Image (cartoon, helix red, strand yellow):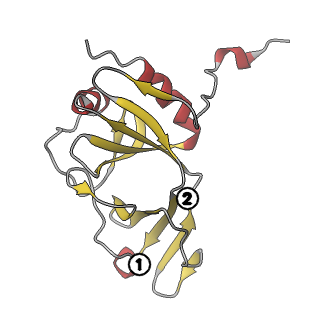
Amino acid sequence: MRDFAKKWARVPDWENQTIETAGFSVKRVFGLHQTLISGAIDKAPVKRKPMGWGPIVKGNDYTIQISRDRILHISDKSTKQPFGWQEAGFATSCADDLYAVFEISGEDCNQVFARASTLPWNGESKSAAMQFSKLNALVYRHEEANKLRVHIDSPSATAFWTWLEQVNLA
């Protein structure tokens, strides 16, 4: 019988593995709670306006825009909002395992972005959703101009990591 698992890339030891190059570094971010909110998002109990690509998101309690009727709330604290349909016209879902979160930082972060996306580095979009290294992703600046947070669908995390390991900026 054939062993098809030999064809697949090994899942990295996310807790202890990083990518370090001369111009950028990558690590997996843990400890964030992610809540997907769908429907009447203008009635959702979020503290700040949802952000898209362009502006710098500050802190560890923020919301990013995915589409017209969908946002993702990210926090280092668990939500007190119950999951499911809410009377105000929106639904909340636990998305902690839906997305793997990566942080890319360094002076050449913009070059990694240019290889992964067709959007302009200095551009802006109301949504953080984009194609990034040919994968569906949520991408935004976090804390500083040269630090990205990238949310990749969890099943694609190893493929994204493999792509990042092969990025050569020389």
Pick the front one: 143 or 82: 143
Residue at the spot 27% in from the left edge and 17% down from the top edge:
169
| Viewport quadrant of the N terminus | top right
Residue sitting farthest toward the left: 122
Q: Position of residue 100 (x, y in %)?
A: 52, 44
| Relative side of 78 to 62, left or right | right
Amino acid type for the residue under numbered disc 1: Ala
**Dot 1 surroundings within 10 Å: few (below 14), some, or many (20 or more)?**
some
Task: Say what secondary structure mark 1 lies in.
Answer: loop
Q: Quadrant of the C terminus?
A: top left
Q: Nearer the viewer, residue 129 or 81?
A: 81
Answer yes or no: do the residues labelled 2 and 1 have beta carbons within 8 Å? no
Is 43 drawn above or below residue 130 in the view shown? Answer: below
Q: Residue at x 63, y 28 (%)?
A: 11
Q: Is residue 118 found left or right of 78 in the rendered image?
A: left
Of the residues under marks 2 and 1, which one precedes in the sequence? 1
Amino acid at the residue labelled 2: Ala
Q: Tell me: residue 146, above or below residue 94.
A: above
Q: Could you say which quadrant of the image residue 47 lies in?
A: bottom left
At horizontal 21% and vertical 38% (from top left) the residue drawn is 119
| Local crowd size for mark 2, using a 10 Å CA cut-off: few (<14), some (14–19), many (≥20) | some
Quarter assignment of residue 5: top right
Checking the image for residue 44, the label placed there is 1
Q: Position of residue 156 (x, y in %)?
A: 54, 35
What residue sits right under mark 2 in the picture?
Answer: 95
Residue 32: percent from the left, percent from the top?
51, 57
Question: Which of these two is toward me, 48 or 15?
Answer: 15
Q: Is residue 25 or residue 136 the one in the foreground?
A: 25
